Image (tube, rainbow, N blue to C red):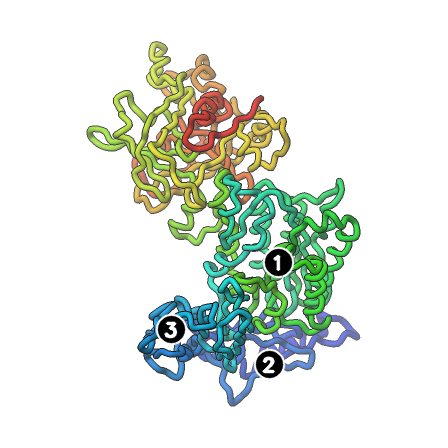
Amino acid sequence: MNFSVCSNLCLALLLCPLFLGVGVLCETLCNDKNLDIEGGYYTLSNGHFYGSMLVYHCPEGYYAYPALTRSCQKSGAWSPGPKRRSTQRCRMIECPNPLVLESGSVFPVQAQYFVNNETTYECYSGYTLRGSSSRKCQPNGKWSGGTPICSSGIRDGDRCADPGTPPGARRTGDFFGIGDGVTYRCDDGLTLVGSKERVCQENGQWTGTEPKCYYKHTYDTPLEITEAFGSAIRESLLVSETNNDTDLVGKKIHVEKGGLLNIYIAMDISDSINEEEFQKARNAVIKLITKVSSFSVSPNYEILFFASDIKEIVNIIDFSGENRKTLDNILTELKNFQYDARENVGTNLNLAFKTILESMAIQKQRNETLFEQLYHVLIFFTDGAYNMGGRPEETVAKINEMVIMNKKDERDKNLDIYIFGVGSDIYDEDITPLVTKRDGETHYFKVKSGDELDKTFDEIIDEANVVGLCGLHRNYDKGTPDSQRLRYPWLARIEVTREGGQGKCMGSLVTPEYILTAAHCFKFEDTVDKIKVKTIKSQDIKVKSLILHPKYNLKAKAAEGLNEFYDYDVALLKLTKSVDVSIDTRPICIPCTKETSAALKLVGEKITCKQHEELLLHKTYEEASFMSYDKFEQFEQENQVKLKLKDQRKNCIGLATTVENITANNLEKVVTANFLCSGGRDPTRDNIACKGDSGGAVFKNYDDYRTIQVGVISWGSKNLCPERVSQKQESTDESRDFHINLFKVVPFLKEHLGDDSSETAPLTFLDG
């Protein structure tokens, strides 16, 4: 039998009726002619079917030209259509023309400036250079440094300094007195982002923000977004412990108390946003609201997806009354939402803004007094493209009118509209009119890809100012030692110098001036000057005092033939000075403190220690982790165990009888109720601790961002790793590890960590 050769496109045409059934027309298909790109490749969101998005990809430092994307139309044509005479190719990224310096010279003079090209700036005689004297074209299509300005000083009649002209722009206006204005426009092919018009004010400052000219391929770095995003919700949730408003003027979201915050999040799921970008934007949203919840505060949320219609996850009204939606409900619904490109053809951006406007109107109608106290933050993820529902500017104006209430001076801070430009082809010119315009602030951010959102949203909240938050950590891992360490900002290494070598243990920062570790890490002759502590960011911290648990006695059962007895095997190292707390160095949470109640989201005046235990150690097999020491000191590794509790604890500790002089008769006197037990291969194979891991934290990640320590690694029944290797060690059926249960040593911890004479704020311990 002879078969004719048919392309994939032809095959799809032949099979289409079989899938769709008799009487149903075949889906439109776009052909694959002239789609290839020189120096790169393309991907399709839904093959050659109607609604499919074609995205071009180029190496770092290059962008697709002349089209970044194409979409398959109902007519069977691509939009924009490929042109036979204009080959699609990867072009080197270009920065805007820097030859705009007035009263000075730019070197070298070129027709175009590409990635890694450098420029220098010199002013004419009588003028002084402000800004950067040299700049470099960066891979994001921006110049490094600040805009160079040649200034002759303040002229007669001037009140404001020369605002300069950014690369790629032209400025109209050369008088800088009170009320004088300047206007900007960008060269062809560039879009103005920032303030098109600026006016000199009595205080000597220009209104608005410095304009920039963006190419299609220009984007903002995670650092730029982090530094700018969130400046206007300082009055929202949980104050820094300083409670000093002058400390709260940074650019990140400061999570403070006393405010009432509504957060509206809208995500574009139209066919111009491919599934991968959608997934990453959703992950960023999950990260943001989970991070905010780590501060034991409860903003009201409205979360919706939009294409031609609205798909609502939660409405702000759901947060009123007794049936308030929980964070878990929101996260579950958000994670379960299914993206389907076939249902998302068409974009009605205006409808998303109208939906939020309607929610605001209902709130205001129900309780206008309460509405006047609310702060409203709108966060949109979109490429700015829309093809139905009309222009959204009018709706945005109504939102401003409803919140600001013609009281701009009083209520200007009560509304922020942020837009994150996501997608492969972002329409800057359609987005910039929609965001909040406030002097010195940025509300539009153009993201290179969804990969950048993860890091960006980890750094959005300025945790360094919220010094009372224990266990808070970053939760992304790029596979590098630095990024992995940031997940364990409480981790400490302890070294004791002795004759013949060094003793090594692990520990955990539990307050800015105390390290929690194991008592057996130290010998009688060890003095504090021989002990050194290292955290992630601090090397060789000196120790002021070593505090062993008063009931710890290694030789307490020597008369019974047991050479080593590890009950109450905990110790505290008091540092000579407190460490500087930041997101990189931060205490872990420990049980039975008010600080940990916040991490567990327990509120009220009568929270007890017992409630902590019931939450953290209530399962028969309780999942926990510990860190292992890496002899190559590249980074520590997280190990997983299942603590055996309740009716499984007896079986677990029974294997301690394999240790010399421990028998069934004395087992429970040796492995007392103060110990947690892990190891073995049932129900799953645990990791096992090795020498050097002693004193380390046995911890639980209560949610994605808070870590709580429940134990201290003490001793094990078998030494499975006599030679240190840079790998996780797995337990055998018989091996067991024993850890001091922190719930059993709370009085010791309270005595020292709750001491009012501490240099830093003491922990507040709970009763019961």
**First in residue order: circle 1 vs circle 2:** 2
Toward the top, the furthest residue is 559
Mark 2 Cα shell of 10 Å, populated few (<14), some (14-19), many (≥20): some
Q: Whole-Å distance between the Cαs marked 1 and 3? A: 38 Å
Q: Secondary structure at mark 2?
A: loop
Identify residue type, mark 3. Answer: Ser
Residue at left offset 44%, top offset 40%? 586
Looking at the image, which is closer to me, 730 or 294?
294
The disc placed on residue 80 is: 2
| Apparent side of residue 646 relative to residue 522 in the rendered image (left or right) | right
Quadrant location of the N terminus? bottom right
Residue 267 found in image quarter: bottom right
Identify residue type, mark 2. Answer: Pro
The picture places residue 263, in percent across and down from the top left corner, at 64, 53
Residue at left offset 56%, top offset 73%? 197
The disc placed on residue 152 is: 3
235 is higher (above) or lower (below) than 408: above
**First in residue order: circle 2 vs circle 3:** 2
115 is higher (above) or lower (below) than 436: below
| Apparent side of residue 668 relative to residue 520 in the rendered image (left or right) | right
Query: Number of marks in the image?
Result: 3
Q: Whole-Å distance between the Cαs marked 2 and 3? A: 49 Å
Which residue was labeled with disc 1?
416
The picture places residue 561, in percent across and down from the top left corner, at 34, 13
Q: Secondary structure at mark 1?
A: strand
Looking at the image, which is closer to me, 173 or 106?
173
695 is higher (above) or lower (below) than 320: above
Quadrant location of the C terminus? top right
